[in-house]
Image (cartoon, rainbow, N blue to C red):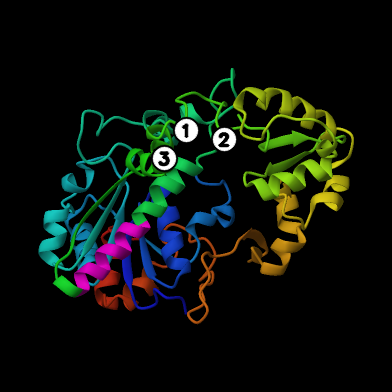
Amino acid sequence: MGPLAGYKFVEMGGIGPGPMCAMLLADLGAEIVRIDRLVDSGLGTATNPKFSLLMRSRRSIAVDTKTEAGRELILDLIEQADGLIEGFRPGVMERLGLGPDVALARNPKLVYGRMTGWGQEGPMAKVAGHDINYIALSGVLHAIGREGEAPVPPLNLVGDFGGGALYLALGLVSGILEAQKSGKGQVVDAAMVDGAASLMTTFFGLMAAGNWKDERGVNILDTGAHYYNVYETKDGKHVSIGSIEAKFYVQLLELTGLDKEDLPPQMDNASWPMFKAKLEAVFKTKTRDEWDAIMGGTDVCYAPVLSILEATEHEHNAHRQTFVKYDDVLQPAPAPRFSRTVAEIQGPPCLPGEHTNEAMLDWGVSQENIDSLRASGVIK
């Protein structure tokens, strides 16, 4: 069992960062019951629920949250939980009668996790948005891309998952640890715009020190530098180079043959465009596999740029079982890893309402009450 075995969470059904947070906690052993709606709300998950991988490792019950009986059922579950995950716009849970004040009155040690894009308060708090908007407002999107080109959205990794799900998971676990000492729960306001901004901390420091320009594609880590970049190979594929440190940079010059030329110092910013042109020409003389044979396993700080499917087959990832097949679906394995309390996928993606009966029984709801709620249409 994972390190969170024995901890219980109620997850209010949603999309994106909320389910990702719940999946992370469930993979680490937490028992999570997901509250889904009676009718599919068109939340944008995969057509075949088998492939909605963010729904793995937990159980689902379907509840009519707008009924008094449904509200009371959810509060009964909240009363037993260590934490709650909800990702609605500010005010929605309050209108359902399930806001923090009500929930904490029933369970004073509850850590109430709220996942939003803009946060619980502020001029934009109730405005609709998605990952791309949150990272735009936090300064992240502007910083990603090449000089003279438009910003490049990094999938929805920075807002939804990095600045959202991971920060909410950290907030929930931190809140639970504190509650064990104080006996008091609290609300975690996890806003994606805040999390994405937090991920930019290093760059604010570099900018304050005068070592980072508020421009795109002209700095050390944003493809401005020739020694930290991606290069196309002879076969139209790509390799990544990260030779920042001088001792690694020396190897880069040796293995590309550029050490034989009279070149400016590595950190001479004005010479970076010339260096990039030279490296572009060199890397196009060989295929990606040929460069792999030359640079793989060296301290150049090199790796081939692999496609998603190629990554699942690489020998390093295969050795570590970074990707696994579960229920015949290839997917990333739980992370991080623990030496003693091993994290593992707890089950396939849950269907809405799939576990209504068994999950409610396990959470102490009587069969008589379950039958009554089902007969009245509150659950299914």
Mark 2 lies on residue: 220
**Tag 3: residue type?**
Met
Q: Nearer the viewer, residue 253 or 240?
A: 253
- Image quadrant containing the C terminus: bottom left
Which label number is shown at residue 200?
A: 3
Q: Nearer the viewer, residue 237 or 240?
A: 240
Residue 304 is at least partly visible in this image: no
Residue 86: within the magenta? no
**Tag 2: residue type?**
Ile
Label the magenta part by its dominant secondary structure.
helix
Residue 94 is at least partly visible in this image: yes
How would you rate the neighbour count of disc 1 (Cα within 10 Å): few for under 14, some for 14-19, many for 20 or more? few
Q: Are marks 1 and 2 in contact (CB under 8 Å)?
A: yes
Q: Tell me the magenta residue range.
A: 169-180
Query: Residue sitting at 42 percent across and 29 percent down?
Result: 136
Q: CA distance from mark 1 to mark 2?
A: 9 Å
Mark 1 lies on residue: 211
Q: CA distance from mark 2 to mark 3?
A: 15 Å
Residue 170: within the magenta? yes
Q: Write down the quadrant of residue 348 in the picture.
A: bottom right
Vertical comparison of 354 with 295: above or below: below
